[in-house]
């Protein structure tokens, strides 16, 4: 049994008149800032328990993958509904993204920067292994995230 005071509140909420003016269409359909996810499906080895889409890391396959993703980034960015969207964060997951050579990671981040409108101060998150060399980070940080 619903207590009387809650019954009254419920009735008031249900009987509340609907707005008479339609919502502002421009505001409702305006592109909202969004986040991009970049998948790097390579690891040193495939763990037996892993259910992620990952593979061992043969170098030729990684290069082909980077080239394919660059093309895919450009094709998505060419879609009008995506090209206008402002990106406020990028997440790079896997797999183990830091197994990708730093130069290849920089290529991917650079492709995102050239293809999408990145918000100033865009947040970039990268999954990494503890053994990762910080020198690789310096190489990746040559990407100019403010140019997009
Ligand atoms: S993603 Fe993690 S759990 Fe899966 S294979 Fe790579 S290291 Fe192993």
Image (cartoon, grey):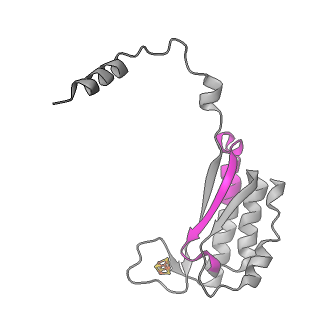
- Give the quarter of the image for residue 4: top left
- Give the percent coordinates (x, y) of residue 112: 72, 58
- Front residue of 89/103: it is 89
Residue drawn at point x = 82 percent, y = 57 percent: 146
- Give the quarter of the image for residue 99: bottom right
- Give the percent coordinates (x, y) of residue 73: 68, 57
104 with respect to 126 (left or right): right
Q: Tell me if residue 90 is in the magenta stretch.
A: yes
Q: Tell me if residue 45 is in the magenta stretch.
A: no
Locate the N terminus by quadrant: top left
Q: Which residues are magenta?
A: 71-98
Residue drawn at point x = 51 percent, y = 79 percent: 55
- Give the percent coordinates (x, y) of residue 43: 54, 81
23 with respect to 70 (left or right): left
- Front residue of 61/110: it is 110
- Give the quarter of the image for residue 39: bottom right
Q: Residue furthest front?
A: 5
Q: Residue furthest left?
A: 1
68 with respect to 141 (left or right): left
- Give the percent coordinates (x, y) of residue 88: 68, 52
Q: How many marks?
A: 0
* Residue 114 against residue 26 in the figure, above or below: below
């Amino acid at each position: 049994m619903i207590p009387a005071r809650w019954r009254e509140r419920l009735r008031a909420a249900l009987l509340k008149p609907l707005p008479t003016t339609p919502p502002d269409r421009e505001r409702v359909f305006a592109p909202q800032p969004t986040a991009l996810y970049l998948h790097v499906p390579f690891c040193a080895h495939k763990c037996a328990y892993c259910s992620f889409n990952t593979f061992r890391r043969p170098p030729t396959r990684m290069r082909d993958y980077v080239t394919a993703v660059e093309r895919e980034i450009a094709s998505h960015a060419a879609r009008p509904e995506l090209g206008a969207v402002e990106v406020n964060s990028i997440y790079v997951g896997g797999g183990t993204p830091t197994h990708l050579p730093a130069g290849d990671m920089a290529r991917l981040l650079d492709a995102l920067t050239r293809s999408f409108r990145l918000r100033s101060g865009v947040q970039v998150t990268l999954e990494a292994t503890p053994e990762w060399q910080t020198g690789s980070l310096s190489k990746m940080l040559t990407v100019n995230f403010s140019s997009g």
